[in-house]
Image (cartoon, rainbow, N blue to C red):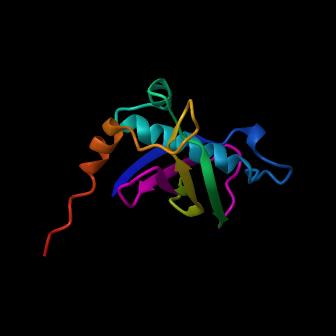
Amino acid sequence: MFISTTKLRVRYAETDQMNVVYHGNYAQYFEAARAEAIRELGLTYREMEAMGIVMPVVELHTRFLRPARYDDLLTLRTELRELPTGHRIEFHHEVYNADEKLLTVGRVVLYFLDAASQARSKMPAGLLEKLQAFFPAKGNG
């Protein structure tokens, strides 16, 4: 399993009239955490796009357990629980506050697509190679 953590501070503009993070902002939080996770693996979205690969979101699931509020320092835990195969990659996200209380959980599925044709594509070989180190091959017996 690959795990990455990213810290974000809630900005005033991200909250609603109740001083709670507006639910729509979590998609951006998850995106920031995914981008940092991929960066930790030695690749960036920009580099993948230069290789002709784009990664649209095809599923987004979010469950809100507790509110995040203005100026909270959040820890976003991003996990890849399975080695991605084919054109699909699934990220699991958990958002914690400074007291380490779980606030929100999410799951985001993206596809690897060829930028020119928009056809499904395989994960870039460099990314696959980096991820394989976190997913030891299962025994043969």
Asked whether 125 or 97 is in front, the reply is: 125
Is residue 43 found left or right of 33 in the rendered image? left
Question: In the image, is 24 to the left or to the right of 93?
Answer: right
Estimate the x, y position of residue 98 in percent, counting from the top left: 54, 53
Residue 28 vs 3, above or below: the answer is: above
Q: Total of numbered circles in the picture?
A: 0
Which is nearer the eye, 116 or 2? 116
Residue 128, how many percent across, how many down? 32, 44
**In the rendered view, does 130 fall on the left or right side of 68?**
left
Quadrant for the N terminus, please: bottom left
Magenta includes 40?
Answer: no
For the residue pair 116 and 77, the one nearer the viewer reads as 116
**Residue found farthest to the right:** 17
Tell me what residue is drawn at x 27 percent, y 42 percent: 129
Residue drawn where x is 50% and y is 43% of the image: 112
Q: Is residue 118 above or below residue 87?
A: above
Part of the protein shown in magenta: 65-92
Q: Residue furthest bottom?
A: 141
Residue 87 locus on image (x, y percent): 46, 49
Q: Is residue 66 above or below residue 83?
A: below
User: Is residue 97 visible from the viewing direction of this image?
Assistant: no
Q: Residue at x 41, y 52 (%)?
A: 86
When asked about the image quadrant of residue 108, the answer is bottom right
Residue extending furthest toward the top: 50
Indicate whether residue 68 is drawn in magenta.
yes
Q: Residue at 63% x, 56% y: name it.
A: 60
Residue 14 appears in the rendering: yes
Tell me where residue 141 appears, x and y as whole percent: 13, 76
